[in-house]
Image: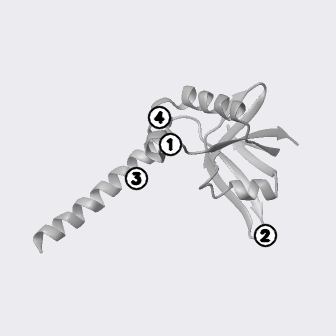
Amino acid sequence: MKILKWLGISLVVLGGALGLLYVAMAERVEVVVVHTRDAAGDHPTRVWVVDDAGAAWLRTGADNSSWLPRVRANPAVDLERGGATRAFGAAVVEDAATVARIDELTLAKYGWSEQLLRALSGAGRRHVAIRLDPR
C-alpha cells in the first residue's frame, strides 16, 4: 500500500514539474494572444508569433488545434501583441514551402523551446501557417 502511495505522489510531482517546464518553455520568448470567435463568443489563445516579409505569422498543428477550426470558419481575428490589440484577417496557408519557412523562423526565434515541443509532439505532425493581414 505504501508503494502505491509513493507512486501516486511521484506521479503528481512529475506532472507538476512537467507543467512548470511547459510554462517556462512557452513563456520565455514572445507570446501573443489571438482572439478567435464563434457562436459561443470570444476565445483567447496564447500562441507564438514570427514575422516574415512584413507580415506576422502564427503556426499550429493541423490535427489537434482547438482554435484553427474557428479561424477557418471566421478569419476575422484580433491579436494582442506588445500591449496593443489590432484587427487582422487570418489566411490559413498549408503549402509545404511556406509552412517550412515559418517552421524555420519559429525554430530560430524560440530555440530549445521549439525543439522540445517538436520532440514531444512526435515526427510527422502536420502544421499549418496563418498569415495575419491587417484589416
**Up/down of 63 relative to 85, above or below:** below
Element type where label 4 sits in the image: helix
> Residue at 64% across / 53% down in the picture?
45
Q: Quadrant of residue 39?
A: bottom right
Element type where label 2 sits in the image: loop
Q: Which of pointers 2 and 4 lies earlier in the amino acid sequence? A: 2
> Residue at 59% across / 56% down in the picture?
64
Q: Which of pointers 1 and 2 lies earlier in the amino acid sequence? A: 1
Q: Is residue 87 something that shows in the picture? A: no
> Residue at 71% across / 32% down in the picture?
98
List the residue tagged with mark 3. Answer: 19
List the residue tagged with mark 1. Answer: 26
User: Mark 3 to mark 1: distance in Å?
Assistant: 11 Å
Q: Residues within 10 Å of mark 1 (few under 14, many from 20)?
A: some
Which amino acid does the dot numbered 2 rest on?
Ala
Which amino acid does the dot numbered 3 rest on?
Gly
Residues at discs 2 and 4 in contact (Cβ within 8 Å): no
